[in-house]
Image: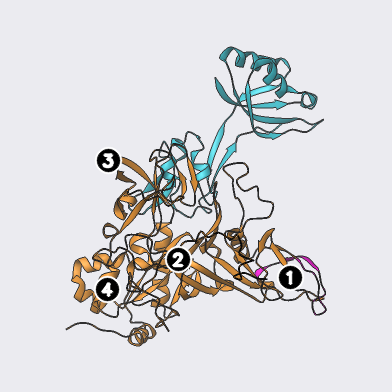
Amino acid sequence: MTCKKTYEEINEKIRQGEAVVVTAEEVIGIVEEKGYERAAKEIDVVTTGTFGPMCSSGAFINFGHSNPRIKMKKVWLNGVEAYAGIAAVDAYLGAAQLPDTDPENKVYPGRFSYGGGHVIHDLVAGKEIRLEATAYGTDCYPNKKVDTIITLNDVNEAFIFNPRNAYQNYNCAVNLGDRTLYTYMGILKPHLGNASYATAGQLSPLLNDPYYKTLGIGTRIFLGGGIGYVAWNGTQHHPNVLRGENGVPMATAGTLSVIGDLKQMDPNWLVGLSYIGYGATMAVGIGIPIPILDEEILRYTAVKDEDIYCPIVDYNEGYPYSKPIDLGLANFKALKSGKIIINGKEIKTTSQSSYPRARIIAATLKQWIQDGTFELIRPVAPIPSAEADIEFKSIPERSVEGFFLNGNGRD
Amino acid sequence: MKNKVVLYFSAAQSEQPIIYRLVKNYDLVVNILKADINPQKQGYLVVEMEGEKDKYQEGISFLKGLGVIVESLSETVVWQEDVCIQCGACASFCPTEALEINRETMEISFNNSKCVVCGMCLDCCPTRAITLHFDIRGLV
């Protein structure tokens, strides 16, 4: 007889303190020992985790008003500009934003020591932050300038809203050229000097539910050390890619947009990063619980590093100029061993995501569920899966000459 | 030859165009790595000097002749465990496996005795958890 469970049945067990919760690492050994059928009956929830650079992240903040009131046109936090093109004292601070004074890559490779991700980390850490804002002044908002010191406690709302996190699989980056490259995948040494990879592999959320059968809009998650929710699919969500028999994509595929109250998060799980020659970003900690609704779901969660493959991509010409250079696939178990073989050559691997931290996230989420403080939420709507006809678009190259004359543009 | 040295100056010596002389008279490539030097005050320069062996030696003699104390640089790499997020990005760049990943736990560790202070790890650490410290002796 096949085993079926509902979200409500699992939540009832969580309330009773009887739910069987294991991490996405632990489930592998349990399946090997007991088989899929028994494991699916016994296990109620599998917890996942990932901790790595996620550039498409940021925070909405409402600062409250100055007296007299202000409609901020531009706003900076520790010299890092936040987007103020929304209501008067609302702003969005992006993780990859740099201070106006940053030398960028003028002295190559640039250091990018401080950016939006660092500001968010400092805010969550309770540090004092310089808030500067300028405005043109209106009858309702006469103030033209604010320059003060704030902490996270001083603002009305601050919530993380990350448009693209938790990438389901990622490229393994290499350099076929003859100079060192400074990329968002770290330093890539020339002539296949190293191979840089990301994601937490067998612990990674979307690799454990490859068709998004249990997670969707409204799913409650571990986000930045606190509680967050899946808001939508992420940007560049592209689920209809080549997949293995286990359903695991062999290319970059699904992504999530996530949201959560910054005030209950932890600076250990939102960490500003500096990628030399590339820019500033933020490491975000995400953990997603997967309810074992049936044996099929359990099978997905039992995925192992050796079952996960990612494409090897050249970042000298292949990626930046979209040149199709086939370097094959890298196996995740091999990547984690420290060496892979490309074109017959043994190459050292460089990790960008923190596997030890991903493991802590999965264990923390497991503890929360076991303690009864974290219940599962049935998604209110699904996110598009592999059958969705989603085309991966690029910016069209069109001539703008005559745009304002031929009736298509503004007069 | 090429060496990293610390040059200790007295207050009087800090007024003189010493680096200019090293470049002009001894044809040395001088790269200042760290400096704490102010007019009328004693201070130091950490420099990397490169040039022909004879010229290099003459340059050092010139410095010593001025009364500048020249010492070879002692550097230390410091791994701040509390800043490290255990991403592992540094390990593949370390030539001596002083920074090493335990492949069972995937945790990184730093063995100072294996470190040759090449500095390769400094740039690839996204949290800047690895720093280079120059051992500068207290000035008298």
In this figure, which residue is indicated by the disc labeled 4?
A298
Please indicate whether residue A175 sits to the left or right of residue B129 in the image.
left
Which is in the foreground here, disc 2 or disc 4?
2
Distance, label 3 to label 4, CA atoms, is 37 Å
Where A282 sits versus B29, above or below? below
- Please give the name of the residue rendered at 61% of the width and 68% of the height, measured from the top-left corner: A406
Pick the front one: B70 or A261: A261
Residue B89's x, y, as percent?
45, 48
Pick the front one: A225 or A404: A404
Amino acid under disc 1: Met
Q: Earlier in the sequence, mark 2 or mark 4?
A: 2
The chain containing the residue under callout 4 comes to A
Amino acid under disc 2: Gln
Please indicate whether residue A52 sits to the left or right of residue A90 in the image.
left
Distance, label 3 to label 2, CA atoms, is 33 Å
The chain containing the residue under callout 1 comes to A
